[in-house]
Image (spheres, rainbow, N blue to C red):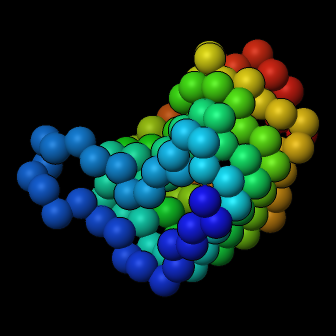
Amino acid sequence: NNNTVRGFTITRTLGGGENNIGVVVASGATGSLITENVLTNNRTAVYLNGGTTQATISRNLIRNNRSGFVAPDASYTGYVIEENNITANKTFGIIFTGSSTIDSSLVIRHNNISGNWVSQLENNSGSVVN
């Protein structure tokens, strides 16, 4: 809890067929801060595991990954995703999948989400993103 990842360049060093995730916000974590990083050439740059609270993801450069953010399972309470450059990813800038529950406290603001091939923000959860 209360972990900070700041100032790193996180990129895949394995072969092109390998799966990897740049940063995982683990289930049960609270108070995570991911800021001022470069996340590039990963399968997924940021994986938001369910059941986490109070995470701030800000001022990161997230580019040339397969997916920028993936939110695959369960609820996200108190998340702030702001001031990131989420560009040129091969699929989604941000995706919430069908099993995600999006809490009304989620804040997505002041991001540059552009040039992602499939979609900038995809919401398949059935919940409203404010």
Position in image of residue 31 (x %, y %): 70, 61
Left or right of 30, for residue 60: left
Q: Which residue is found at the position 37% from the left and 76% from the top?
A: 9
Observer able to see residue 100: yes
Q: Residue at the location (70% across, 20% down)?
A: 125
The answer to whether residue 34 of the structure is visible from this angle is: no
Return the residue found at the far left. Answer: 15
- Compared with 117, 55 (above or below) is below
For the image, the number of numbered tags is 0
The residue that appears at 77% across and 31% down in the rendered structure is 102
Q: In which quarter of the image is the N terminus?
A: bottom right
Nearest the viewer among 119 and 83 is 83
The quarter holding residue 73 reads: top right
Residue 44 left/right relative to 70: left
Which corner quadrant of the image does residue 95 belong to?
top right
Picture coordinates of residue 107, whole percent (x, y): 83, 51
Above or below, 129 against 67 in this view is: above
Q: Which residue is nearer to you in this view: 127 or 23?
A: 23
| Residue 124 x/y as whole percent | 66, 20
- The quarter in which the C terminus is drawn is top right
Residue placed most toward the observer, 11 or 92: 11
Q: Say left or right for 7 vs 13.
A: right
Residue 51: x %, y % from top left: 65, 35
**Residue at position x 81%, y 49% in the image:** 78
Which residue lies most toward the bottom here? 7
